Structures are given as structure tokens and as C-alpha cells.
Image: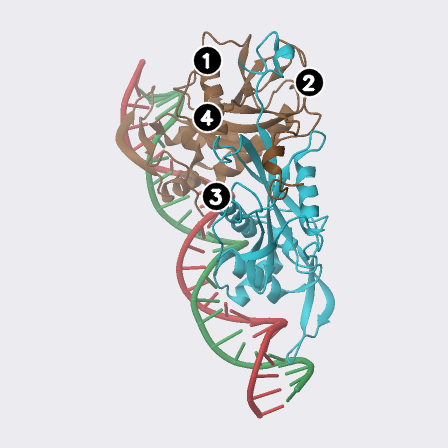
Chain colours: A brown, B cyan, C red, D green
Amino acid sequence: MTIQNSSSEKYNLEKYEKPSVTVDLLIFTILDSELRILLVKRAAWPYENSWAIPGGFVRMDESLENAAKRELHEETGVTDVYLEQLYTFGEPDRDPRTRVITVAYIALIDSESRTLRASSDVSEAQWFSVKKLPALAFDHSTIVEYGLNRLRSKLEYSNIAYGLLPTEFRLSELQRVYEVILDRPIDKRNFRKKILSLGFLDSTGEKEISGAHRPAMLYRFNKKEIVFFE
Amino acid sequence: MTIQNSSSEKYNLEKYEKPSVTVDLLIFTILDSELRILLVKRAAWPYENSWAIPGGFVRMDESLENAAKRELHEETGVTDVYLEQLYTFGEPDRDPRTRVITVAYIALIDSESRTLRASSDVSEAQWFSVKKLPALAFDHSTIVEYGLNRLRSKLEYSNIAYGLLPTEFRLSELQRVYEVILDRPIDKRNFRKKILSLGFLDSTGEKEISGAHRPAMLYRFNKKEIVFFE
DNA sequence: TGAATAGTGTCTTTCAGACAATATGCC
DNA sequence: GGCATATTGTCTGAAAGACACTATTCA
């Protein structure tokens, strides 16, 4: 029987048992030249003391995206960051307590915004390199794997990197973001040629001096929304 | 409060009000040289007599994908077709009855499998060209738009077209699939050069005679799973 | 032999990738 | 001057795109 079919559906809509629905957040940042995600330590059964990606229930009056924004704010204090729905995971046995369907989101946090809430209600939260992750609760390893693939492929054909950098940055920093996420070295000359030809970077005209060497020109993304190319 | 935090969460999990969760299906096929989707006519409030994409509730003991497969089978009688999760739509007011979160799936049906169930429990079901769609119930126009974009971009860098063709087909048929979905003409010589160089087509050695003209070689996809290239 | 579709090759341009030397600022 | 990072150009190979004629079958 489908929503569309039953002639008595308006009386039946509430008769089915309903699953719980949560949002889970894959929060990425670049820290110490590594791609990292935020994990929280679970305090209770199931998976007590295991690390997990943060998440929580979707309230009846908020959209999925707003639920994700609220959770993100609760965990990190940040607002206005890149947020994208990743995938919905709904195996019947993914949570031993009850049926829980989770809508996973990706969030990208730049190095300037990156701070953890002092007064978090989470017992412990930590940035883990995606190359050295602990065992994760539930099906969260699957979610991380899926999110990494999404991030990597979007990096190759969109300006998504803007979410991981502060407003102004050096081209070498941008290249580092690509190298860290794609996990391979990139030729500097080819990278600059390509990235500048795409036309989504503007030179600020400013140079940044940061040590005993030639200062670098600062650039910024000319769009703070995702754009695909090719 | 998140799943991870509350020390009394195991007693609280059931205290929240829960949304209904459905799967909705965007079922594509090629018919009369047009890309079409299956729509069903609603029999009851809300959107009575409006067209909608088929869908139904997720049962407590089935995965999202199995719910989609079950609905697909109920509507079309087919099994073993290409099925992909599209996106999850969860605006609080998208269904006037109650909070309904829907996980949308794409299904591709080839011209040989394409038959509608005689004994469908739906009042009416029909294949509509995506270029001439009626007004749709709920937020289904948004879902269709989203699905079309997904299908178009996957067509350009994967072998997803296998889902829309029978096992054996002529290159001109494959080209027609591309032209119809991308909605633009493609040069025959460039298309053949490119598609054959990708290596996911095998020649069957058979030729198909279908009228007063030179017979065409038949090809088949050498993988019945999605593969990305480039 | 006419109608209809199948099948094929060249040229040009664009883009990706390999590759190394000079420039600038601070100490 | 030494160190550290910034900045720049050429060559080659691969792929994309423009473009038109011949082949085969049946009626």
C-alpha cells in the first residue's frame, strides 16, 4: 500500500510504526596539513566509549538542513559554513536500540573558524586525521568512507575548496588543500596554470609576508557558493 | 541533546515524536525517443487527482533500498534494475497531513522490461515525457528536477546508460539515449570513437536487420554495474 | 536504383602533464 | 650571501570537436 493509493489513507497515516530520524555530521577541516574530521566520544550504551561522528534527532518542526545546522552549531559554535547532504543510511539494524534512519551531512570548516565549543555537552570531542581513524560506532565508518569519496570527487570539478580556507589565502595553501585531500603531490606550475584559468579566483593585490622568504600574493574565491566546472 | 550525549538516552529514545518516512521513486525509461518518467494519479486528499511519483512507507524491518525495490516491483512488476538513492527531502511542510521525510530513488527501466502491472492498486499510471510534465503533487517537481540533473551528469561520466537499454543494442540506439537525455544532437563519428574507446562495450558479432537498410552490429555492456571513467 | 541506416578518417584546437630556473624577502 | 618560498614557460601527447563520404540491405 502506498501513500498515493489507499482510499482511506488519511485515516491510516498514523497507524504505521515510525522510525527515528537523525542527522549525522561529517565535519571536515584542514589542520596541521592533514584532512581531519570531528569525532565525539560516546558516553552511553550502545558503543559506550567509542568514537562517533556527531549527530542528533531531527525535530518535528525543523528541516533536515536546519537540524544539521543546529547540530553543527551545538558542536562547534560555527554558522554559515559549507553544508551538503551526503546520503541517507537506513539499514534496519544499524542502531541496536531501535530503528534509526540517519541523514548524513558534510560540513567544511576553515582554519580561522575552527574552534570547539568550550561548553559542549559532549564528554569529549577531537579532530582526527582521516588517515588515522579509530574504530567508529554504528555504521559511521561507512559514512566517513562515503563522505571522503564525495569530497574528493567534488574537489576535482568544483570550487568546494572555498569551504576549507579563510577568505584570503596563498595559492600554495590552496594547493596544499588539494594535495592533502587527494593524497598525492601536485606539480606547482600545472596547478597554478589550471586553477587560475578556471576563473573563480581573484587576486586581492595584497601580499602576505610570513617569514624569511618572498611574500606571496593573496587570492580569494569570487563565489561563496558551489560552482561546477568542465 | 544528541544521541551521543544524554546519559539517560536509552530511556529517552522513544520519547520524541517521530516523522513518517517514505521512499519515492523516479522511474525513468526511454519510450518513443523520449525520456519518460512514471507518474501515478492520486486518488485521495491531499492533491487528489494530481499526478505524483510513486512511493510508499518504509517498513520497520526493511532497508531503504529494499523499500524502494518493493515499491518498484509493486508499481511495475520489474526486479533487478538499476536503482540509486537520489536525495532525501524533508521540509517540515512538504506534506500537509503530517511530517513526512522522503528518501527519493532513481530507477532505470529498459525498453524490454518496461510493462506496467495490470493489477496495480493505483488508479492510473502513465509514462510522461520529462519535457511535458503536468503539475505534480507535493514537492515532486523538485525531486524530478533533482533527478534529471543527476541522470544527466552521471550519463556523461559513467556507463549508467546500461540501465536504459536491453542487453543487446545498436550503437545508434545508445547514441539516441544520450541525445534524448542530454537534449542535444551528438556527432555520430565522435560519439562512436569516444564510446568505443572507453572499453565498456563489447561487440556481440551479431548483426540486426531491421528494415530496408544496412544491418547494424549489436553491442552489449560488459559490466552490469555502474563504473565511472575520466 | 532509391530509401534508409551503418560505418569510417583527418585535421585542428585544447588541455593535461612532465619538467627547472629565476625572483624576492628576511636573517 | 644563505635560506625559504613565490613565480613563471615550453614541449609533448592525448583527447575533443568539426566535418562528408561510402557501404549495405531491402523494396
Q: Residues within 10 Å of mark 2 (few under 14, many from 20)?
A: few
Q: Left or right: where does residue B29 sit relative to residue B132? A: right
The residue where tag 2 is placed is: A97
| Residue type at tag 2 | Arg
Residue occupying the far left of the picture? A205
Residue that numbered label 4 is attached to: A66
Left or right of D14, for residue A191:
left
- Judging depth in this view, the residue of A17 and D13 nearest the camera is A17
Circles 4 and 1 on the same subunit: yes
SS under mark 1 = loop
- The amino acid type found where label 3 is placed reads Thr
Where in the figure is residue B186, as x and y percent of width and height? 50, 63
Q: Nearer the viewer, mark 1 or mark 2?
A: 2
Q: Whole-Å distance between the Cαs marked 3 and 4?
A: 19 Å
Amino acid at pointer 4: Asn
Q: Chain of mark 2?
A: A
Give the Cα distance between marks 1 and 2. 29 Å
Of mark 4 and mark 2, the one earlier in the sequence is 4
Residue under pointer 3: B142
